[in-house]
Image (cartoon, rainbow, N blue to C red):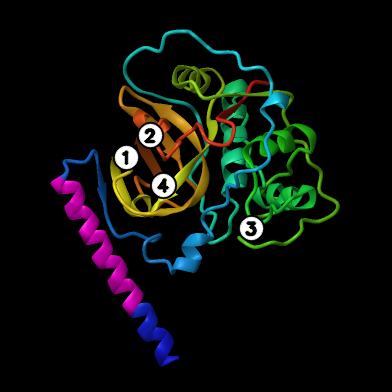
């Protein structure tokens, strides 16, 4: 027991030191964002690894709906679409479920003002039954959209989230589903999709520095690749996107982060990896 306590204390001190070093680097380079120790940086490496649940997948672009660029000029200034609250996936690689469910919930608010609370638990266990992987082991962007279309999802009250693999009751119904989705890697189309349809479901590469994000417009600065993560875009302005995360409200800007547009075209691949950015059209 004493060894465990000592190990945890050492890890906490290392995390604090790393965060301080990053803070200094960001100040020295006049970065567009700030870092701080938070609930995520205080996790063990194994717990942190459970946050990354987006897999590269075997997506086939030939089977995607034809991309229709939305060329309507986007006015300067900021916009934020209706969406539901930030949630916490815990140390379970189910970010794909939270991103997809959050996208549906926002789309329902935009479409007809309907407030929904989808079961991320049901989503991830359906994904596990479809395979490969799913559950807490991660899944894919395009197959998530197809799950919403072909399988549907039950409500949170019918199958609450447990941050672990556990089946929902066999008696649940799955009334929440979509008829069509689209994808893009075009920034203006993503912006117009947020205005027209609501949140946009995206993935990106997570590096060590992102774990310490506190505020501002994130841009990769330092650190190695940790994994890939799924989230949903809920707004934008002249500098970048506003994004709803699933790491709880104790991380970032009350659970959100902002990210510069140039992170779409570098190694972060925000909104451009694994098939692009996905949105519900009907």
Q: Say which label, 3 or 4, has the lower sequence index.
A: 3
Residue at the disc numbered 3: 136
Residue shown at 68% from the left, 55% from the top: 135
Q: Say which label, 2 or 4, has the lower sequence index.
A: 4
Q: Say which label, 1 or 2, has the lower sequence index.
A: 1
Residue at the disc numbered 1: 219
Disc number placed over residue 180 in the picture, else none: none
Residues at marks 1 and 2 touching, judged by CB atoms closer than 8 Å: yes
Disc number placed over residue 263 in the picture, else none: 2
- What span is colored magenta in the figure? 10-28
**Taking the image as drawn, is residue 158 in sight?**
no
Compute the Cα span from label 3 to label 4: 21 Å
250 relative to 13, above or below:
above
Q: Assess whether residue 120 is covered by the magenta stretch.
A: no
Residue shown at 29% from the left, 46% from the top: 221
Residues at marks 2 and 4 touching, judged by CB atoms closer than 8 Å: no
């Amino acid at each position: 027991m004493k060894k465990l306590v000592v190990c945890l204390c050492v890890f906490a001190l290392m995390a604090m030191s790393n965060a301080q070093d990053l803070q200094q680097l960001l100040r020295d380079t006049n970065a567009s964002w700030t870092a701080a120790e938070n609930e995520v940086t205080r996790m063990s490496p194994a717990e942190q690894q459970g946050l990354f649940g987006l897999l590269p997948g075997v997506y086939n672009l030939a089977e995607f709906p034809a991309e229709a660029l939305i060329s309507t000029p986007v006015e300067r200034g900021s916009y934020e679409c209706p969406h539901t609250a930030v949630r916490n996936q815990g140390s379970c690689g189910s970010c794909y479920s939270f991103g997809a469910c959050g996208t549906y919930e926002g789309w329902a608010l935009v479409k007809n003002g309907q407030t929904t609370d989808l079961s991320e638990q049901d989503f991830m266990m359906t994904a596990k039954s479809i395979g490969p992987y799913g559950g807490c082991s991660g899944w894919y962007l395009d197959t998530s959209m197809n799950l919403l279309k072909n399988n549907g999802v039950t409500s949170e009250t019918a199958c609450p989230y447990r941050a672990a693999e556990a089946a929902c009751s066999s008696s649940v119904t799955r009334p929440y589903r979509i008829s069509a989705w689209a994808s893009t890697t075009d920034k203006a189309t993503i912006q117009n999709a947020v205005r027209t349809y609501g949140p946009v479901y995206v993935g990106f590469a997570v590096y060590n520095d992102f774990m310490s994000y506190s505020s501002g417009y994130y841009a990769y600065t330092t650190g190695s690749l940790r994994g890939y993560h799924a989230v949903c875009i809920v707004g934008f302005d002249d500098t970048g996107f506003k994004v709803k995360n699933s790491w709880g409200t104790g991380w970032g800007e009350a659970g959100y982060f902002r990210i510069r547009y140039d992170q779409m075209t570098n190694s972060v691949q925000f909104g451009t990896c694994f098939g692009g950015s996905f949105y519900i059209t009907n």
